[in-house]
Amino acid sequence: MDPVPTGGARARARLAAAVSTAVLTVLLGLCGAVILGLVHQQTGSDGFLVGLGLAVLPVPLLLAAFRWLDRAAPTPRRHLLFAFGWGACAATLVAITVNGFVTEWLASSLLPRAPDRADALGTTLVAPVVEETAKAGAVLLLYLHRPRDFGGVVHGVVTGGVAATGFAFTENVLYLGRAFGDDLAFGHFGLESSTLGTFFQRAVMAPLAHPLFTVLVGMGFGAAALVARRRRALRTALPLLGLAAAVTLHAVWNGAASRTMWVFLAVYGLFMVPVLGLVVWAVVRARRRVLLTVRATLPQYAAAGWLAAPEPSALACPRTRALAREVARRWYGRRAARAVAEYQRAAVCLALLRARAERGAPPPGFLVHERDLLRTLWHRRPLASPATTTAARSVPRAARR
């Protein structure tokens, strides 16, 4: 049985968490400052501003999609901020530095007489490995250091997708800024504009490209989190398989983009779109499975007296959860709504934690974490339980499935 931490141990743990958060924030800030300088150097001031303005357009839509997915089992907001910052700052800095170094080495050492071939190899073979490994760093760090909050495939997909959205944002600033600089240099405007073509390709036709690749990595880590801890080989193999799939898909995409327009459109329509549809289908099924797990697991806590009888099915429905927060806000204000949100997140985490333990895959400190979540339920229950029960009565049972 896990030891119960003393007050001093809890204080030391909170201090260590605060120090690590501060250090990580400073490091990401430094990476952001460096990548900002590199992008500005390659685009110029005008190109940077135009690229920034255009690159930000698809970001809210992508984040909204991942937040919808995340509603099934909410990820702590600080983890999402870390993932986006990692992708936008650290991963892009690693990618620009390593891709440039390896491509120059190929051109100078292995292919001195064929620089175009060196660029093609760098784009098709080197960049997918470097970029997907760099983006996967955010998922890996949360998987290793925040295993309690990494409850399965949905958490992996959301983390990977948000990290890739940050990466794509910074990369789009660079590409769109360069394109605008070329347009200014050669006097291209209107339909002949490189900026328009780049924006159409990256933000209209393929805004999900980078998220799609890294979602595969997140699925691998999320599946590994659900595997029994004694099956170490499988827990190691699943993230590696996800990374291999992401690198392969990325290489196919880059290879098609470097060919003729007809080749690119054929690969886009006959391969990438079906793969995207298959991944979306799998992710939506995983989201539904999370809600079914919550509905099936929480009744045992209700039987023990931690929840009221109507609450398990209500907490397994995002629509009912949202209504409960709205009820609390109308009754007692925004602080009450936040308290209900904490109650809901604790209940969902409790259900997923118990389900993982029953599968033989409990995270480290399972019993301590379970007690912490039960303590949160107990403290928030006087306010949150009536709001949740009221919401459950307002939403028909059939609508909660």
Image (tube, helix red, strand yellow):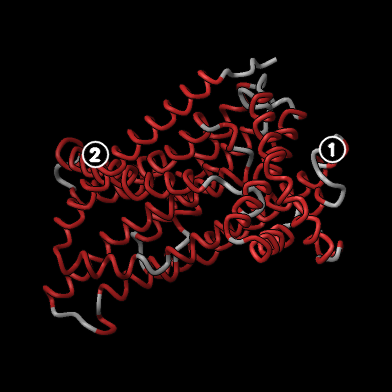
For mark 1, does the 10 Å Cα neighbourhood hold few (<14), some (14 to 19), or many (20 or more) residues?
A: few
Q: Nearer the viewer, residue 360 or 183?
A: 360
Q: CA distance from mark 1 to mark 2?
A: 61 Å
- Is residue 221 visible to us here? yes
Q: Quadrant of residue 196?
A: bottom left
Location of mark 1 (residue):
305
Would residue 217 be found to the left or right of residue 48 on screen?
A: right
Disc 2: CA contacts within 10 A as few (<14), some (14-19) or many (>=20):
some
Residue type at the position of mark 1? Gly
Q: Is residue 279 visible?
A: no
Name the residue that disc number 2 marks: 102
Residue extending farthest to the front is: 332
Q: Is residue 356 left or right of residue 93?
A: right
> Front-most of 349 and 103?
349
User: Can you say which quadrant of the picture contains the N terminus?
Assistant: top right
Q: Inspect the image, locate mark 2, and give the three-letter code of the amino acid beneath it.
A: Val
**Count of numbered circles on the image:** 2
**Residue at (64, 15) in percent of width and height:** 3
Q: Which image quadrant: the C terminus? A: bottom right
Front residue of this view, candidates 344 and 128? 344
Front in this rendered view, residue 166 or 186: 166
**Residue pushed farthest bottom?**
190
Residue 15 is tagged as none
Where 216 falls versus 332 (above or below)?
Answer: above
Q: Is residue 81 above or below residue 331?
A: above
SS type, badge 2? helix
Q: Residue at x 71, y 32 (%)?
A: 356
Indicate the position of residue 255 as horizontal and vertical percent values.
Answer: 38, 54
* Position in image of residue 115 (x %, y %): 18, 49
For the point 32% across and 70% down, the residue is: 54
